[in-house]
Amino acid sequence: MRSACLRRVRLLEEAGVIRGYQATLDRDEVGLGMMVFVGVKVERHNDTEANAFREAVTALPGVRDIRSNFAIQTVKTPGALPLGHLPG
């Protein structure tokens, strides 16, 4: 026999009010301990250059300067982590 609370939770899930549940992973433990913000200055600001940069994300001829900033502390953890580097 289900509890009244569990029934309410199931109804909220079925109605789409509760969309899902998540696990909060330790970034260091999954090999993502360092977060880096990178700013890139390009020579020209237009759709062609932006699309080429987005596709390549490497040293393009239009890249004038690249600077990296390192996060000292995480204030708010974003959503999903890129875990493609982990086995299985």
Image (cartoon, grey):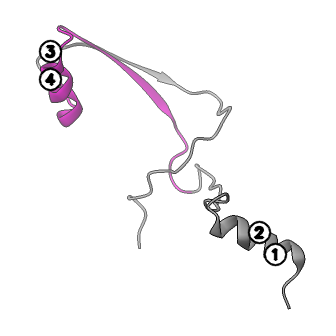
Of the residues shown, which amino acid type is indicated by label 1?
A: Leu
Q: Secondary structure at mark 2?
A: helix
Tag 1 and tag 2, C-beta contact below 8 Å: yes
Against 83, residue 3 (above or below) is below
The residue labelled by disc 3 is 62
Of the residues shown, which amino acid type is indicated by label 3?
A: Gly
Tag 4 and tag 3, C-beta contact below 8 Å: yes
Residue 48 x/y as whole percent: 12, 21
Against 60, residue 16 (above or below) is below
Tag 1 and tag 3, C-beta contact below 8 Å: no
Q: Spatial distance from mark 4 to mark 1, Cα to Cα? A: 55 Å
The residue labelled by disc 4 is 60
Tell whether 23 sits left or right of 85.
right
At label 3, counting other C-alpha atoms closer than 10 Å, the crowd grade (few under 14, some 14-19, many 20 or more) is some
Queried whether the magenta region covers residue 42, the answer comes back as yes
The residue labelled by disc 1 is 6
Front residue of 85 and 4 = 4
Residue at 41% from the left image edge and 69% from the top image edge: 87
The residue labelled by disc 2 is 9
Which residues lie in the magenta part?
A: 30-59
Against 19, residue 46 (above or below) is above
Q: The N terminus appears in which quarter of the rendering?
A: bottom right
Q: Spatial distance from mark 2 to mark 3, Cα to Cα? A: 53 Å
Residue 78 x/y as whole percent: 58, 41
Residue 6 lies in what quarter of the image? bottom right
Q: Spatial distance from mark 1 to mark 2, Cα to Cα? A: 5 Å
Considering every residue shown, the one lying at the far top of the view is 43
Of the residues shown, which amino acid type is indicated by label 4?
A: Leu
